[in-house]
Image (tube, rainbow, N blue to C red):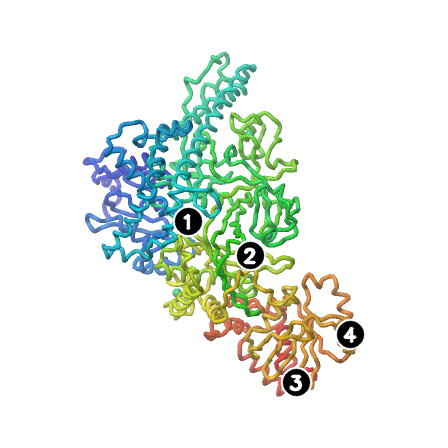
Amino acid sequence: GVDSQGYYRRLYLSADIRRVVAKEHTSLLERPVREEVERRFKANHHPVRPGDVNVLSATPTLEMGIDIGDLSAVLQCSVPPRQASYIQRAGRAGRSTGNALVMTMANAIPHDLYFWHEPRTMIAGAVDAPGVFLNASAVLERQLTAYTLDCWVQDALRAGARAKGASIPKTLGEVLKYVGKADETAFPYTWLKYVEANQEALLAGFLELFRSEESSGSFRNRLDAELTPESTQWLRSFIQGGEDREGVAPSLAFRILNRLNEVDKDRAELKKRQERIGKETAKRQSEVQSDSVKEDLARLRQERRAIGALLARIDSKQTLNFMTDEGLLPNYAFPEEGVVLRSVITRADRSASHSSQSSGASSSESSGHEVAPQTFEYERAASVAIRELAPNNTFYAEGRRVVVNQVDISQAKPEPWRFCRQCGHAEQGGTTAGLKQCPRCGDGMWADSGRVRRMARLTTVYARTPDSESRIGDDSDERKRAFYVDKMLVDVAPEDVSDAYMVKSPGFPFGFEFLRKVTLRQVNFGESGDATQDAMMTIAGEERPRPGFQLCETCGTLQKTRNVEIAYLNHAPWCSARHQAPSGLFGSPGSPEEGIFLYREFASEGIRFFLPEVAFSEVPKAMHSFMSALELGLMRRFHGAVGHLRIAADVRMASNTQSAQTYLVIYDTVPGGTGYLKELMRDRTPVLEVLEEALQVLRNCACKDDENEDGCYRCVYRYNNNHDRGLISRRLAVQLLEEVLGHKDQLVKVHSLAARQQDNPLLESSLEKRFLEALRRPWPGGQFQLKDAMFNGKHGYWVHAGKRRWRLELQVMLDNSQGVAIPCKPDFVFWPDDGVDDLPIAVFTDGWQYHKDRVLDDLAKRQAIAHSGKFSVWTLTWSDVSAAVQYDQVNPISGSGANVAVAGNSAPRGHSPWQSLLSGNAVAAFEKLLQSNRIQALNAFHQQPAFLQLHARLAGHTHRQM
Ligand SMILES: [Zn+2]
Ligand SMILES: [Zn+2]
Ligand SMILES: [Zn+2]
């Protein structure tokens, strides 16, 4: 416009310009800090006062429960995970006027891009109702604890008690004073004694709360389940306590005292450190006051003040807040083990660092000039902390960027652990294990010394950062992140397995079982960037680099290669190893000790699925599609409220073979379990219903009509499978579920999946198993029927191949009596059993370990069989057979030299996906060619993948026709 030059000038002069005062608002902030931010944001002064916060940069904490008044704009920096979150967040704005700006940024990740194309499905999509976990033992325990505390306070008030132990001390410091001395006349002992004296009445009163709700109908109806007798029994043992044994929850009193004792120990440890600092300070002061000694002294002073601040922080915590945050009393989140980051921001001591320049300046105590270090404490759930708070990771909060550089190993000491090579089993005290084999899977390498590594539970970490380095500048938009090798190890003792169901068909060994107790151990094996060849180690069947973390054995600081001048950073200022050569480390170079692993652990309940190896474990796409379908079924079953149920793949080697067995374990992330999975396993039907319900949704989902779509957010896609999006296919999930459910009538109750009979003891090699699997598949030439049979005292099969019938024997010894000059043993022999004048077919499968040493030898033998004229001889390689059993609709396999048509998504419903490997037309053409022109037919025939040539041979072409 005409006045464009003066636009900003006029704007700034006339308009109501407000400075942007932004603050962070996250669950990481301590309560008083967070509440102050909220207060300043809500203040809404007229006129505006400088410093009033008008922009909150928030994590999902703002989504629920917190009142921050009305907003005029909500800017979302990513697409929310679910419709419910979107509505919660967007709904924060425009409450008073009905007008608001709501903007959402889509990042370049599959989840966000999906909704970039389909914004309506987020803005107007269906919202899942939140669920109630009534019988979750962990939830009930906290409610009961709160109830007894209420009753105790009320009784004390009624009695007008003013005695020392008759009320809850305000701060944790006061509580710990008595806990340390085990003074039974003070809180919490007085409360716990009250609970002990009134167990029955308290329990009855608590249970009555549930009963009375029954009368007030509508609320009652929203609860999915009533208190089960098991839950009541659980609560009884929780309040009564009793012997400390496996499978019995720690009692209420134990939980409270144990947690307080842990905090007390933590405090004692910090005090011990202060003493060390005192000693170290005295020692340094007695030395010649060189610059480096002065610097050391300054660092020691900073550290002493930092530790003093940490102690004060613990002592000043509000008692009730502490109990809520620790999950001893109810809070919004499920109780989960937490990891604490203690961040110390040190300030440069100007007088000390400049003393070298200012010659002749006073070298006396300069603490008066020093700025006290700042301390911050953040707690993260162990499930995320195992990576986010691992050594060398960068952590961002409150405008600062700090690097985790020390692990508290004073309480959670590194212990030797023995790790199984083949399965997820690990045992503490690895050096004394007397067993020769893994107690879970029987692996013979169990006793090997190389199976032992040191490991520490991650509980508290430190970051020590100079003030200037901690400030987040504009230098980078990207957050720094370290990458780790980590894995959830799933461990189940055989006695904790119950209610197993299994399809006993050798071709489809599907089954599932209930795990009363499954131990989930998530281990961080070190930074993936640190990978060196000698750090390779196989655990749970996976060979990965596992460098561990190189920590100082005294102070737990991460060791890094540094210049001499800053080598002190490798230790805490109080560490006695500070001035030693780098030895005494967990995993220092040149020492036999390797870096230590860090872990978190919890026990819960689970359901383990055993999946047919060929269809699932070999094909990541099948695995992920099935997992996604399973999750969908669970969401339908429990009306969306399954955030606490997770699925982990548990792939392991069967003992003494090279073939992997694939299990999926659905586990409950709430320690002890919520009872959901137990309910699913009350008999065989609920699990099948879950799968059936998933199948219904998948079959009928609106996205099925779009040729370009193979899934959507109404069916297989979810926020949490964003990373695996390329591996998730609705069509494949439908086919897999149909296959599983097609066998449901064959499901029988068994003792456990592990005890299932090997389908065929002769099938030593995985390749042979795969070959049989491939034979069973429907191919364009027709589907063969395999029936179990006994031939010559050994397990074999009747094979109905179209019009032909064969007797299939495994590992048959052929010698002179069959006219073979050099005795040999093909993997399979098909004997004609339909009177057709045809030769038997000897099949060798190659390329697997059992064969590799004898290939040359075999070649001679095969020649001998072929020359005998009594057999057709076929050789199938590893890739021939794998190609036949692995399918992938997006990237169809290509047989060697074969023209495999891409059938893509046109596979008819109800048919196996394997059919899509070849188009039907190719086969019809092949048949025609065969009739009209022998030579061309042979060419067409030989263009087929090797396995399909054999298939066609079995289905209808005699030796002479070939
Ligand atoms: Zn094992
Ligand atoms: Zn050290
Ligand atoms: Zn869909």
Q: Amino acid at mark 3?
A: Arg
Mark 3 surroundings within 10 Å by alpha-carbon count, few (fewer than 14), some (14 through 19), many (20 or more): few
Within-10-Å neighbours for mark 1: few <14, some 14–19, many 20+: many
In the image, what residue type sits under mark 2?
Answer: Val
Compared with 943, 138 (above or below) is: above
Q: Say which residue label 2 marks.
A: 651
Answer with mark 3 or mark 4, whichever residue precedes in sequence. 4
Q: Percent x, y for residue 231?
A: 37, 51
Q: Nearer the viewer, mark 3 or mark 4?
A: 4
For the residues labelled 3 and 4, the Cα–Cα distance comes to 34 Å
Give the mark nearer the N terminus: 2 vs 1: 2
Looking at marks 1 and 4 on the same chain, the residue that comes earlier in the sequence is marked by 1
Q: Amino acid at mark 1?
A: Val
Residue assigned mark 3: 934
CB at mark 2 closer than 8 A to ligand 1?
no
Find residue 932 and report its image quarter.
bottom right
Q: How far apart are labels 1 and 3 at the CA level?
A: 67 Å
Chain-order first, disc 3 or disc 2 = 2
How crowded pointer 4 is (Cα within 10 Å; few <14, some 14-19, many 20+) is rated as some
Mark 4 within 8 Å of ligand 1, using the beta carbon: no
414 with respect to 143 (left or right): right
Secondary structure, mark 1, is loop
**Disc on the earlier residue, 1 or 3:** 1
What whole-number distance in Å separates the C-alpha atoms at marks 1 and 4? 62 Å
To which residue does mark 1 refer? 670
For the C terminus, the quadrant is bottom right
